[in-house]
Image: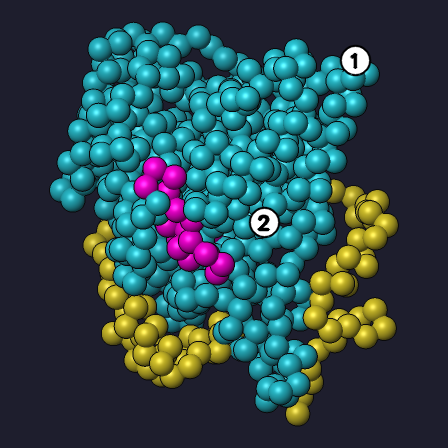
Amino acid sequence: MLSESEVKHIAKLARLGLTEKEVKKFQKELSQILDYIEKLKEVDINNVESTSHPIRVFNVMREDEPQKREDQLREKLMALAPETKNGYLKVKSILK
Amino acid sequence: MKVDQLTIREFHQGLKNKDFSALEACQFFLNKIKKEDKKINSFLHLSEELALMQAREIDEMIASGREISLLAGVPCAIKDNILVKDIKCTAGSKILKNYIAPYDATVVRKLKEQKAIILGKTNLDEFAMGSSTENSAFFPTKNPFDLERVPGGSSGGSAAAVAANFCFFALGSDTGGSIRQPASFCGVVGLKPTYGTVSRYGLIAFASSLDQIGPITKSVEDCKIVFDVIKGKDDLDSTSIKLNESNLKSEILNLKSLKIGVPKEYFIEGIDPEVDKVIRNAIQKYEEWGAEIEEVSLPHTEYALACYYIIAPSEASANLARYDGIKYGYSKISNLKSQISNLLDVYLYSRGEGFGPEVRRRIMLGTYALSAGYYEAYYLRAQKVRTLIKKDFEKAFEKVDFIFTPVSPTLPFKIGEKISDPLAMYLSDIFTISVNLAGLPALVLPCGKSNGLPIGLQIIGNYFKEEKIFQIANFFEINHQNSNE
């Protein structure tokens, strides 16, 4: 069973704000799912390689040249941002 | 006008014969949706303006005597996690409620090049995480066969829209069964192609090593038509694969020389006896038509679900890190009343409020599995089990040409039945997720009903054998019209 402080730690790593009530709810649900996942410990994985990708993939290289893009793309992308200033994305202070 | 009952080929012929215009057909479908979708809720939003503009363009082409492609004027729907330029794309999430797609997904670009008409965007579980479409932040979709039941998920809107004859086909995405399970629940055809066959560019990422876009249609022939348009290597998706021409040729299958594997691990206790019966009947039909049926074993099947629920959430936790309340999407950054003073608070509140419970659950699960001290015990172990699951299939395909299984252990369940028990919901994907872990292609074919509820057969083929899958599935359609038991 995950502890409350573990749930809070994971939520912080994941940058998810949780209410106290949600902490309790997720504690129960995540523990239940993790108990089920314990099943994987039954499998003998000695000398088994890991699969990160179902089909073998390779690096894809191309010339580093600017591509022709739609003229309005920059404006469209900036219009999606919640706060901008002088054509830049605005963020809150990082340091106190 | 019974235009909604036609196949894609019949519709194409009707357009060419001038039985109806593209605009008339388009308006017919838009009106039908406006009238009848109130009770099903398969669409999140319509792209009426785009659709009518496309339809007029096709009528002009026809009027000026130009050739039109098979998909020209064919109304379709797109799952709302696939980008259509200048149209809203929400992924079923509050965090993207007002997001306007700045570009087309490659599959959408290809459909537009063929002049298929995009009617609108269909409902889904938030970020495609779910098996019932109840996790949509907006509203649940209902099963057209029984409005008290779920259409399946996560592509529940797409499957319900096709089943309700609101469009000829829809695109879905499949990470653990999200095309196949709703296709089965709604009595339509759905294909999860081989991983890498269809470009994922413009698909809102959930679990990148598992996600694949595919068609949901009313017939196997229609499925092939759509698949042929959307497949192919794309420079904008580094995991897409250049297809080998020899795999694409339609060889004529002789059923008598084919072996169909039936994995014993898929006919287990807990499977609904009605599902079991209908699937076994379908398999028996193939035997009667001359195919050889052989029991095979996929010994690691029982670990697939646990394996998936490490790998998919881990990848999701990384993919969904991009929703930060700064670049786009729901944000608390400019909320003057709140106590948000620094960057961390913007993340915590934007993500905490923007994501629904299932998405947060999976992000946390993935974050936990990847965090210091747990990586080897969970993520690395799951990746090794994934290898064993893949090898099970490779071994089976040394002996057989196809593997036939049920799609879901149950009939479409009631809305609300499983939503409060995440693990019970996860278990409804038990027969579909291995295919994603292995990267194989699989098609769902409606093969019968129980109490008016559809049941689908899952046909799994070897890598890149979609053509063969279409042929063997087509055989069923021709020889066995769906019986209403």
State the residue at coordinates (57%, 33%). Answer: B29
Q: Quadrant of residue B13?
A: top right
Q: Is residue B294 left or right of residue A73?
A: left
Identify the secondary structure beneath mark 1. Answer: loop
Q: Is residue B7 left or right of residue B255?
A: right
Q: Does residue B369 sit above or below A23 in this rendering?
A: above
Q: Which residue is mark 1?
A: B65
Q: Does residue B223 sit above or below B51 in this rendering?
A: above
- Was residue B143 drawn as part of the magenta stretch in this picture? yes
Q: Is residue A13 left or right of residue B102?
A: left
Q: Which contiguous range is marked in magenta?
A: B128-146
Q: Amino acid at mark 1?
A: Gly
Q: Amino acid at mark 2?
A: His
Front-most of residues B423 and B158 = B158
* Inter-mark Cα distance, 2 to 1: 34 Å
For marks 2 and 1 on the same chain, the one whose residue lies earlier in the sequence: 2
